[in-house]
Image (spheres, rainbow, N blue to C red):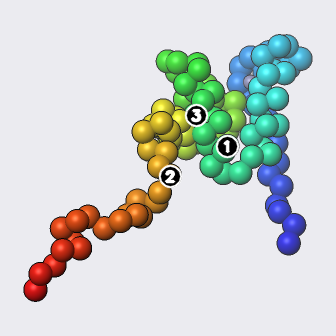
Amino acid sequence: MKKKRRAVHRCECKECQRHPYGVLAKEHRAINRVLAGLDEKSRRQCAGVLALQRGRGGVQAVHEISGLSRTTIRRGEREIRGLKRTDRIRAPGGGRQPVEKNNRTS
Ligand SMILES: [Zn+2]
């Protein structure tokens, strides 16, 4: 089965409309080309990184550039920020049972 290709989103921000061949418009097109080639999770996290880099108003800016929902971008941000702490090797609940559960005496 052929994977359905996502169409490259076209940024509709003011800057791209004013200067369609400007540096920023080129950057926005590049971002959308990259995002279009990623799977859902990577796209979300990539958008999250871009939003984090932009700081205040970053989510709104990336939303305008990528057409991704603000909720999705915020989720990506959270995933990226929390990656160190939540990047578990084992799945939750994996591994040994807590000792209490093993030592049943009855
Ligand atoms: Zn733009």
Q: Which mark is residue 93?
A: none
Q: Mark 1 packing: few (<14 Cα in 10 Å), some, or many (20+)?
A: many
Q: Residue at x 80, y 51 (%)?
A: 6
Is residue 9 in sight in this rendering?
Answer: no
In the rendered image, which quarter is residue 82 located in?
top left
Viewer-proximal residue, 50 or 92?
92
Nearer the viewer's eye, disc 2 or disc 1?
A: 2
Whether label 2 lies within 8 Å of ligand 1 gets the answer no
Image quadrant containing the N terminus: bottom right
Q: Element at badge 2?
A: loop
Q: Where is 21 relative to 98, above or below?
A: above
- Whether the residues at callouts 2 and 1 have beta carbons within 8 Å, the answer is no
Q: Residue at x 71, y 24 (%)?
A: 13
In the rendered structure, which disc, 1 or 3, sits on the residue that comes first in sequence?
Answer: 1
In the rendered structure, which disc, 2 or 1, sits on the residue that comes first in sequence?
Answer: 1
In the rendered structure, which disc, 2 or 3, sits on the residue that comes first in sequence?
Answer: 3
Q: Element at badge 1?
A: helix
Q: Where is 95 relative to 82, above or below?
A: below
Nearer the viewer's eye, disc 2 or disc 3?
A: 2
Q: Which mark is residue 43?
A: 1
- Whether the residues at callouts 2 and 3 have beta carbons within 8 Å, the answer is no
Q: Residue at x 58, y 34 (%)?
A: 48
Three-letter code, disc 1: Arg
